[in-house]
Amino acid sequence: MSDPDPDDLADLVRYECRDRVATITFNRPQKLNAFNDAMVMRLSQVLHEFDVDENADVAVLRGEGRAFSSGADVHQRQLRSDAEFKKHGGPQGWGANASDLFVKAVNWKPVIAAPHGFAVGLGLGIVLESELNVAEAGTRFQVTETSRGLGASRYWALLDFRGAGSFATEVTITGRFFTAEEAQVAGIVDRVVPAGQGLAVARELAQQIAANPPLSVRAAVRTRRWYMDQAEREAYLQTTPLKLHLTEDFKESARAFAEKRKAGPFKGR
C-alpha cells in the first residue's frame, strides 16, 4: 500500500488565522469527524502550528458538517488484532494518543471548543480539555468508552476537574447521552447558544481574550493544564494496568458497532 498523500492528510484538519484568532477545523464530515490515527496526528501538528504562530493568540476548534466529532474511528482504532493492540499499548496507534494533544505546548495559548451536533468519546475529551467551550443548543455528548468496554476514568477525571461532581459519575457509569443544556447546568459547558451561532460566539470570546496581554493569559493556561494533566495521569495509572482493550467485552462491543447490532451479552472478562 502506498503512503497517504500529504495533501489529503493536511485536509483532515484545516488551519487558518485571522485577527489573532486561529480557526482549526476537523474536516472528515463523511465520518462525522471520527478520528483515525492520521487525523489525531494531523491535529497534533496543527496545534503545534498554532502554538508557534506569531500571529495567533487564541484558537477555536470546530467540526465541519453535522457534528463536532463522533469520537474515535472504531473501524480503524478499535478493531485491531491483539498483536497490534499489544504493540501500540492500546487502541490508539503509536504517536496517535489523543490524551497528549494539549500537554505538549511551548507557549500555552488558550483554546476554545465550539461543539455542535455530537461531541462524544474522543470528541468530548477535546471539549473538556479546551480552556473554554461554546456549545450550540441541542449538542449531544457521551462518554462512549463505558459502553465500548474501555476505561472511562479519564473522562470522569476531566468532568470532575471541571466541577461536575455527581453528574460526572452518573454520565460516566451509565454512558448515556447528555445535552449541552444539561452540561451547562453541571458546569461542563461555558455557554449554550442557538444553532448556527457557535463559531461566531466562540470567535467573539476569543477576541476578548486576545485583547489581553498574551503572556498573562498563557500563564493561567499553563497552570490550568498542569492540574488537568495531573488528574488525567492519575486516572491512567488506575486503569492502564487493567488492559481493558484486550478483554472479550471490548472486542464484542467493537464488533457489534461495526456490524450495527446490539452488543452483548457481556461476560465480565
Image: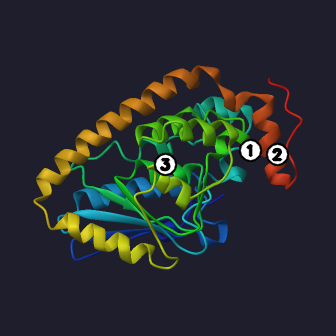
Tell me the kind of residue under disc 3: Ala
Which numbered disc, 3 or 2, marks the residue that appears first in the sequence? Answer: 3
Q: Is residue 16 visible?
A: no
Residue at image location 58% in from the left, 75% down from the top: 65
Tag on residue 186? Answer: 3
Q: Which percent across, then down, holds residue 224?
A: 29, 41
Asked where in the image residue 110 lies, by quadrant, the reply is bottom left
- Specify the amino acid type for callout 1: Leu
Q: Position of residue 7 (x, y in %)?
A: 48, 71
Distance of label 2 from label 1 (alpha carbons): 7 Å
State the mark number for residue 159.
Answer: none
Residue 53 higher or lower than 185, as above or below: below
Mark 1 or mark 3, which is nearer to you? 3
Badge 1 element: loop
Residue at 57% over, 65% down: 139
Query: Pointer 1: what residue?
Result: 79
Quarter of the N terminus within the rendering: bottom right
Circle 3 sits in a helix, a strand or a loop, which is it?
loop
Q: Which residue is mark 2?
A: 255
Whether residues under marks 2 and 1 lie with C-beta atoms below 8 angstroms apart, the answer is: yes
